[in-house]
Image (spheres, grey):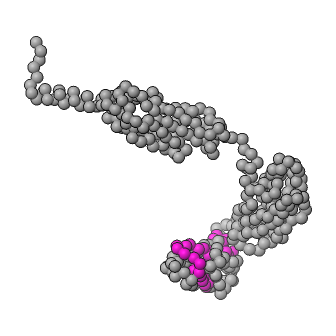
Amino acid sequence: MPMKLNPHQTLITLLLLYSFSFSQAQQILFEKTVHDFGAIIEEKGPVTYDFKFTNTGSSPLIVNNVVASCGCTTPGWSGQPIPPGKSGYVKAEFNPINRPGSFSKTLQVESNSTQNPVLTLYIKGNVNPKPRTIKDDFPEKIGAIRFKTKFMSMGVVKTNQPFSYSYPIANESDKPVTFKDQVAAPPHIKVTVTPKTIAAGQKAMLSLEYNAKLKNDYGYIQDQIQLFTDEVDQPKKDLVVVATIEDYFPPMTAEQLALAPKLVLSKTTHDFGKLKEGEQASVEIEYRNSGKEELQIRKIKADCGCTVVSADKYFLKPGEVGKFKVNFNSKGRFGKSNKNVTVFSNDPKYSRQVITLFSEVNP
């Protein structure tokens, strides 16, 4: 005998059936959600894959958007509504140029699917890098010779002994190139090229020896050097050597440090506030020797020609106080700016101290 349902039970059953029917309205089912491109050759350019899906629901399915996790991946998809039982696609295009090595990217698929409105697809693979050329490794060219850069950075150079560094260079031409003994460089920089004659398509080493003590300066230093070859076109090679010179202090015990000179600045920042373009502003900063031995101010150096520094003392006995004045000229400068003044001393613990100057220049 069939069971009778009361009106309340009948209503619940109808709602459940309606809910089930509605949940089946649009359904998206992908054949797979992960694709492995495997090994990709970089120089061949972009690769693509179509993720195919079927609308397993009872109403048209619409893919509203596909969002890639990286600009290297370009998505595409079926733009028209997909009828029940029919198929569509989501296209993933990956560009391997300048992206060697393994990769893993995602695409988020947004649709009107009642069950999975947002689905994630995955692509992965490994990009085999293209063979590098001399131009790739040495982007700067002067005549037939290529350099990694025209700015040869020596990094931090100490004053205790000369510092050497070598840079590879390459001959891009189909003829040998010989470097002459003639070199235009300041006395604190020695330059050698080994071998002097570079065969066609071959490399050599440009070596620099930097003597910071001979330079007798501190902070960021920039020097011009010129090399000469037997080339007809562009035989002169203009290069720049940059270095940051700092004092060398041998290792010291705690007792030695306690007796050493000690530089203490009255402030390490100053805000000139708002200035009109062309207006000048200045500030006085005190410095004290809180150590037990004489303090020597090696140099006070501004990082901009707009800032001029003058000091009243460069040698301070223990407990003695000195002052230096910083003048900032806002001519030709606009907006917010940060300028640095660096104080170099024989304080072995803090031989290099920086004061930052803030300003906002309005027209």
Taking 53 as reference, is 291 left or right?
A: right
Taking 319 as reference, is 223 left or right?
A: right
Q: Which of 295 and 217 is in front in this view?
A: 217
The residue at 37%/25% (across/down) is 85
Query: Which image quadrant is residue 17 in?
Result: top left
Locate the N terminus by quadrant. top left
Location of residue 90 in the rendering, given as x and y in whole percent from the top left corner: 46, 35
Query: Which image quadrant is residue 96 in?
Result: top right
Q: Which residue lies furthest to the front in this view?
A: 80
Main SS class of the magenta portion in the image:
strand
Q: Nearer the viewer, residue 107 or 61?
A: 61
Above/below status of 82 relative to 325: above
Location of residue 134 in the rendering, given as x and y in whole percent from the top left corner: 76, 48
The residue at 73%/62% (across/down) is 151
Above/below status of 209 relative to 99: below
Q: Nearer the viewer, residue 187 or 108?
A: 108
Location of residue 301 in the rendering, given as x and y in whole percent from the top left corner: 66, 76
Q: Is residue 273 rendered magenta in the image?
A: no
Q: Is residue 332 rendered magenta in the image?
A: yes
The residue at 88%/58% (across/down) is 231
Number of numbered markers: 0
The region drawn magenta spans 323-351
Location of residue 352 in the rendering, given as x and y in whole percent from the top left corner: 64, 71
Taking 238 as reference, is 195 left or right?
A: right
Q: Nearer the viewer, residue 154 or 63?
A: 63
The residue at 37%/34% (across/down) is 81
Above/below status of 79 relative to 31: below
- Residue 22 appears in the figure: yes
Q: Residue furthest top?
A: 1
